[in-house]
Amino acid sequence: MNNTLTKTLSNSRAAVSTLLITLTILLTSCGSGTSGKNLKINGLKGPSVVLLGDDILIDVVFENMTIEGGARYNIPKYPNSYVEISPDLESDGTLLAFSVSLDDVFGDKVSQLDPLTLPGGRAIPGVSSGTLPAVAFSIEKFKNVAFYIGPKVFGIWVPLKKVGMPGAMITTRFYTGSKRMGNLSLVGEDQNGENAGFFLALTVSSSAKRLLKKQARRY
């Protein structure tokens, strides 16, 4: 009985701790919902998004990860797209960059992809079915990167080693400049202490495309 009570109290403390961490992240990282301020993920700079020509460019810097050399990898079933990992030029961290062609996003091969949840089986936030057609793959330092495609929605999943909010998930608006472009979700560890990461979902409508092109001119 005592062991059961101790375990229950321990689980309760863990749940309260996770809730407090989640609330702290929300209160300190996000604006009013119209401010254009994105969720700040500890240890990361970004993600940031622009459109260069017909390619969506997404990059994020892992501030506490150091590599000596990098590589570029083709994305399976996305013939015009790639992901690249390299030392960041502006810091001691590591740059993870995605170049995703809109030809791949709107191409016929999208319908051939199997629908997937987030890694570990949790439902995709903001999607009624909880799944989207996707392709998952692994590269150096990153296991189970995934690309998701749906009607007017494009998403990427990037794994993180530790988030510190087991069982929790935060979803906030994501902005390019002052305009909303989609959602950014921070996903805590599952019941096995695995599959933490962030999920970036972007709207790829014609109006969003025009906005990304406008933002790209600033670079």
Image (cartoon, rainbow, N blue to C red):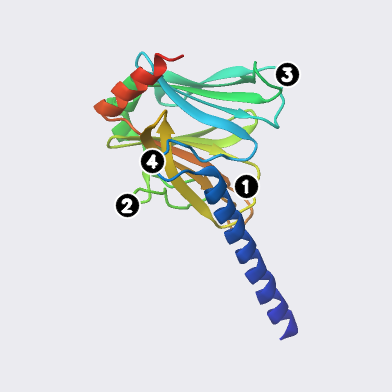
- What kind of residue is marked 4? Thr
Residue 148: x percent and y percent?
A: 40, 36
Q: Dot 4: few (<14), some (14–19), or many (≥20) neighbours within 10 Å?
A: few
User: Which of the two residues, 201 or 31, is positioned nearer the viewer here?
Assistant: 31
Q: CA distance from mark 2 to mark 3?
A: 42 Å
Which label's residue is closer to the chain start, 1 or 4?
4
Q: Nearer the viewer, mark 3 or mark 4?
A: 4
- What kind of residue is marked 3? Glu
Residue 90: x percent and y percent?
A: 65, 18
Q: CA distance from mark 1 to mark 4?
A: 26 Å
Residue 93: x percent and y percent?
A: 68, 25
Which label's residue is closer to the chain start, 2 or 3?
3
Q: Secondary structure at mark 1?
A: loop
Locate residue 26 relative to residue 128 in the image: left or right: right
Q: CA distance from mark 2 to mark 4?
A: 24 Å
Q: Dot 3: few (<14), some (14–19), or many (≥20) neighbours within 10 Å?
A: few
Q: Quadrant of the N terminus?
A: bottom right
Mark 3 touching mark 4, by CB under 8 A? no
Q: CA distance from mark 3 to mark 4?
A: 40 Å
Q: CA distance from mark 2 to mark 1?
A: 25 Å
Residue 200 falls in image quadrant: top left
Q: Nearer the viewer, mark 1 or mark 4?
A: 4
**Numbered badge on residue 163:** 1
- What kind of residue is marked 1? Val
User: Which of the two residues, 219 or 95, is positioned nearer the viewer here?
Assistant: 219
- What residue is at 54 percent from the left and 50 percent from the top? 27
Q: Which residue is mark 2?
A: 128
Which label's residue is closer to the chain start, 3 or 4?
4
